[in-house]
């Protein structure tokens, strides 16, 4: 079982990020990708992944929320980090118009810089998209290199899913699928997601799966709760948990070259 998105740089994990990794591996996960969403979190992901390169890898990127902090100097530093072998994908990068912490123009320029970096390094792309689907696809169709591509934390419906599958992308599913308040379109879409495109993720510390008993007592989501995402996917698709684990682990192996 491989957790595709773990954000160890977050405040919730500040006192002991490595403990989060250890609890995940002890609970039976075979690996995880430590996500970079700014310069500092990219550096931390690399540093921690290097402690156990058999089970961990890192990504390097600037999240669209932080696109307004983009400078050429910072991106040059990130580009150098991204050449390290332990870095298996460029991102998180993409568009997020849900809150627009950065302007759409800042997000767009930052996103395109990442697509160019992935092209230059020939590394996979780790994408984030919320409330910006049409522009996201337009930018990808114009600028995306032909590298393995993952749209992480997919929460949209069937037509968006089909658009991404038509382009050969991998799809990351989080605990969003267990959230009855907002999972309706995702539940309709997911039976149409082929097993060879599926990746599973916690997006820890966020999106704690609401099918965990005593979910309300959990302060931060962690990789050790990934089996609850598997269970929710199993409930929605009819595939056994074992089938979901086998395919998503194999897909992670292919996507991250891990
Ligand atoms: Zn994201």
Image (tube, rainbow, N blue to C red):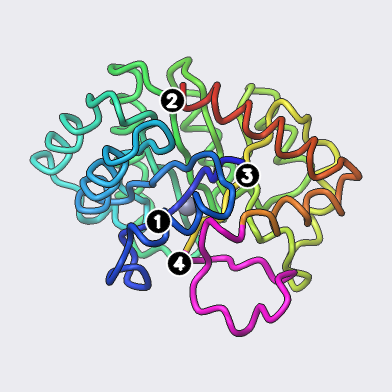
Specify the farthest residue to the bottom: 217
Instruction: Note whether ligand 1 is within 8 Å of mark 1.
Output: no
Q: Would residue 32 appear left or right of 79 to someone viewing this image?
A: right
Q: In the figure, 93 relative to 183: above or below?
A: above
**How many angstroms separate mark 1 from mark 3 (CA)?**
14 Å
Residue 85 in the image: x percent, y percent?
Answer: 28, 23
Q: Which of marks 4 and 2 is in front?
A: 2
Residue underneath mark 2 = 124
**How many angstroms separate mark 3 from mark 4 (CA)?**
25 Å
Q: Would residue 113 appear left or right of 224 to someone viewing this image?
A: left
Mark 3 lies on a secondary structure that is strand
Residue 200 numbered mark, or none: 3
3 and 4 marks in contact (CB < 8 Å)? no
Q: Is the magenta stretch mostly helix, strand or loop?
A: loop
Residue range in magenta is 205-225
Residue 172 in the image: x percent, y percent?
Answer: 61, 42
Q: Which of marks 3 and 2 is in front?
A: 3
């Amino acid at each position: 079982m491989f957790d595709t998105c773990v954000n160890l740089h977050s405040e919730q994990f500040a006192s002991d990020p490595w403990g989060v990794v250890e609890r995940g591996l002890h609970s039976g996960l075979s690996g995880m990708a430590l996500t970079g969403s700014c310069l500092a979190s990219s550096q931390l992901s690399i540093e921690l992944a290097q402690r156990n390169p058999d089970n961990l890898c890192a990504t390097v990127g600037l999240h669209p929320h932080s696109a307004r902090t983009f400078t050429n100097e910072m991106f040059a530093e990130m580009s150098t980090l991204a050449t390290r072998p332990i870095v298996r994908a460029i991102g998180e990068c993409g568009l997020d118009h849900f809150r627009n912490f950065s302007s759409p123009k800042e997000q767009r320029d930052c996103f395109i810089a990442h697509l160019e970096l992935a092209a230059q390094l020939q590394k996979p792309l780790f994408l984030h998209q919320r409330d910006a689907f049409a522009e996201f696809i337009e930018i990808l169709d114009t600028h995306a290199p032909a590298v393995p591509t993952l749209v992480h934390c997919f929460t949209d419906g069937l037509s968006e899913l089909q658009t991404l599958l038509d382009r050969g992308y991998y799809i990351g599913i989080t605990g969003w699928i267990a959230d009855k308040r907002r999972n309706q379109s995702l539940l309709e879409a997911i039976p149409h997601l082929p097993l060879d495109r599926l990746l599973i993720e916690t997006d820890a510390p966020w999106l704690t799966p609401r099918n965990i008993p005593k979910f309300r007592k959990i302060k931060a989501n962690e990789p050790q709760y990934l089996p609850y995402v598997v269970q929710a996917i199993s409930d929605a698709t009819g595939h056994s948990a074992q089938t979901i684990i086998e395919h998503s682990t194999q897909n992670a192996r292919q996507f991250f070259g891990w």
